[in-house]
Image: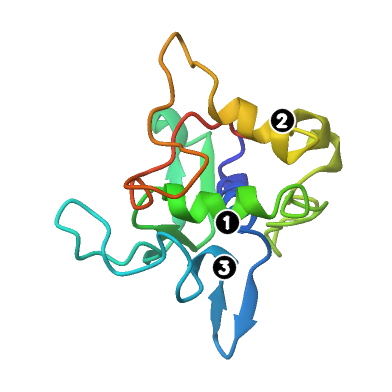
Amino acid sequence: MNGRLLPALFAVVVTACGGRATTSGSATVRPSCRAGAPGADQHCGLTGNVDCCGWSKIPGGTSNRLNNPKLPATVSPFKLDLLEVTVGRFRAFVDAYPASRPKAGDGVNPHIPASGWQSAWDPKLPATRAELLKTLHADIGNRPCPAWTDQPGPNERAPVGCLGWY
């Protein structure tokens, strides 16, 4: 994969989880991180004192893939979540589904044309909320997905798992 696409793909994931991001002043706020949203508080991480929606700036840069100077890869600066998406934050995405599905161009890197969500990927997503819930209860490699529950519960701050890339 072209190393320059990584931030664009990451942005698609971040934008898609919990719906459309909005800008408030200089800060971008994802709906799943609004105050009072499940799993969007300051009590995540192993010690329970990490911002569930915290992120770190990654400076970007160029490196040689496979240590080969003929294979340079450049990654633009981007923001990376400190933690995996919580069950509570993903619940906001599920509750709004299918309206929360990414739209063509979501997560685009402004430096890479056509790098955002592609409408050709739409068929890979469940068509309805009921179909999405069914995938959250599916066994993955004969292992059930234990963190997800249809109703809020004790796992709201746990990482959601068993999700495909799309």
Precedes in sequence: disc 3 or disc 2: 3
Q: Which mark is residue 124?
A: none
Horizontal side of 129 relative to 90 (left or right) equals right
Label 2 vs 1, first from the N-terminus: 1
| Residue lying at the far bottom of the rendered structure | 25
**Vertical position of residue 11 compared to residue 146: above or below:** below
Residue type (three-letter) at the residue carrying disc 2: Glu
Tell me if I can see residue 85 in this picture.
no
Q: Contact (CB < 8 A) between labels 3 and 2?
A: no
Considering only vertical position in the picture, is 5 above or below 71?
below
Q: Which amino acid does label 3 sit on?
A: Arg
Q: Mark number for residue 92? A: 1
| Residue in the image at 45% along x and 56% along y | 61
- Give the residue type at disc 1: Ala
Quarter occupied by the C terminus: top right
Question: Which element carries disc 1, helix, strand or loop?
Answer: helix
Task: Quote the CA–CA distance across marks 2 and 1.
Answer: 16 Å
Q: Can residue 5 be seen in this view?
A: yes
User: Which residue does the image show at 35% across and 68% down from the upper left?
Assistant: 41
